[in-house]
Image (cartoon, rainbow, N blue to C red):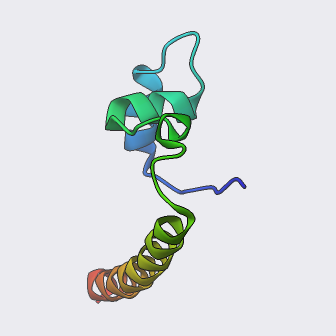
Amino acid sequence: MTKMIRVPDEYHAWVKAHNRDDETMFETLRRLTREPDPEALAGILSSDEVDDARDAAERFGGRDDERLTRAREAFEE
């Protein structure tokens, strides 16, 4: 599954400036944010733990959406 995100032009330019010739933008972002490779984590969590993590991510994401909406509204005032 692929998701698209919007970032400010300045941030995109910064990431692009750090992009190596042999990297995709995703690989550059992963390297810059020190995100682990998902394949390196395979088998560490049980299926129940994966389900719990997904549930927590969905709950967190919902709170974040509400917070972002409030921030946008406050900025526009």
Q: Quadrant of residue 32?
A: top left
Q: Quadrant of residue 31?
A: top left
Q: Which quadrant: the N terminus?
A: bottom right
Pick out the residue farthest to the right.
1
The image position of residue 23, as x and y in percent, is 56, 19
The image position of residue 46, as x and y in percent, is 51, 60
The image position of residue 34, as x and y in percent, is 33, 34
User: In this orientation, which residue lies closer to the viewer: 22 or 58?
Assistant: 58
The image position of residue 73, as x and y in percent, is 35, 88
Judge left or right: residue 1 versus residue 57: right
Q: Which residue is located at x 44 percent, y 35 percent?
A: 30
Q: Which residue is located at x 53 percent, y 56 percent?
A: 6
Q: Which quadrant: the C terminus?
A: bottom left
Judge left or right: residue 2 versus residue 59: right
Judge left or right: residue 10 versus residue 22: left
Q: Which residue is located at x 52 percent, y 41 percent?
A: 38
User: In this orientation, which residue lies closer to the viewer: 37 or 46?
Assistant: 46
Judge left or right: residue 67 versus residue 30: left
Q: Quadrant of residue 33?
A: top left
